[in-house]
Amino acid sequence: QTLDPKMPGDLVYGLGLTRPELGGSEYFAMKGLIGSSVPQVNAKEALELYRKVFLAHQKELLASCISVNLGGLGVALAKMAIAGELGLEVDLSRSARESVERDDYLLFSESQSRFVVTIDPQNQKSFEKHFGPSAALIGKVTQVPRLKIKGLNGKTIVDLSLLRLTEAYKKTFNSY
């Protein structure tokens, strides 16, 4: 499955639960911190979600998919937008989370066994039935080439052009 969103109007879902697990994260490293809440894997939950993702792929319910890992949800969303050259509008308050009440923690937590997927709205009913409560509708794909993210309080916390995101992303590879 590719990570690039395919069509404006497609729906963006978060799969899996975000916890305040930033110990050893890219975000804390950027701030000169280490942290003590390192990401933990619940093998039973992870296996169940991975099986559901595999079956959803087999059923052709997914338009795009990316795992959330280094850098967290914010980085995964940026990579998707850049790859698809399409915008994303996301509302963090809709994300499945446990004990996370800060926007930065929700964006950059490196909790394991999470995905961001996009789907054709025609597949919404089948998709939601397949995933049940482990799927959270967090946004949509847009034609406007911007990554816009609303925080937990409903205020916009990220509003960046894809051009700026792409330049920032590619800049990290200048020395390679």
Image (cartoon, rainbow, N blue to C red):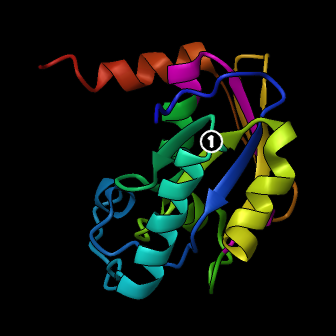
- Residue 9: image x %, image y %? 84, 29
Vertically, is 33 above or below 171? Answer: below
> What stretch of residues is rendered in magenta?
81-96
Q: Residue at x 63, y 34 (%)?
A: 63
Vertically, is 95 above or below 63? Answer: below
Whether 67 is among the magenta residues is no
Query: Outermost residue, left direction?
Result: 176
Residue type highlighted by circle 1 = Leu
Q: Residue at x 61, y 47 (%)?
A: 59
Q: Is residue 91 visible?
A: no
Whether 85 is among the magenta residues is yes
Q: Find numbered disc 1 in the image and state the secondary structure of the residue it sits on.
A: loop
Left or right, 28 with reference to 176: right
Q: Is residue 32 visible?
A: yes
Viewer-proximal residue among 55 and 174: 55
Viewer-proximal residue among 94 and 174: 94
Q: Quadrant of residue 170?
A: top left
Left or right, 138 with reference to 125: left
Viewer-proximal residue among 147 and 135: 135
- Residue 108: image x %, image y %? 49, 59
Where's the C terminus, which quadrant?
top left
Q: Residue at x 33, y 53 (%)?
A: 30
Vertically, is 98 above or below 50? Answer: below
Disc 1 target residue: 62
- Residue 65: image x %, image y %? 53, 42
- Residue 4: image x %, image y %? 54, 27
Mark 1 burial class by Cα count in 10 Å: few <14, some 14-19, many 20+: many
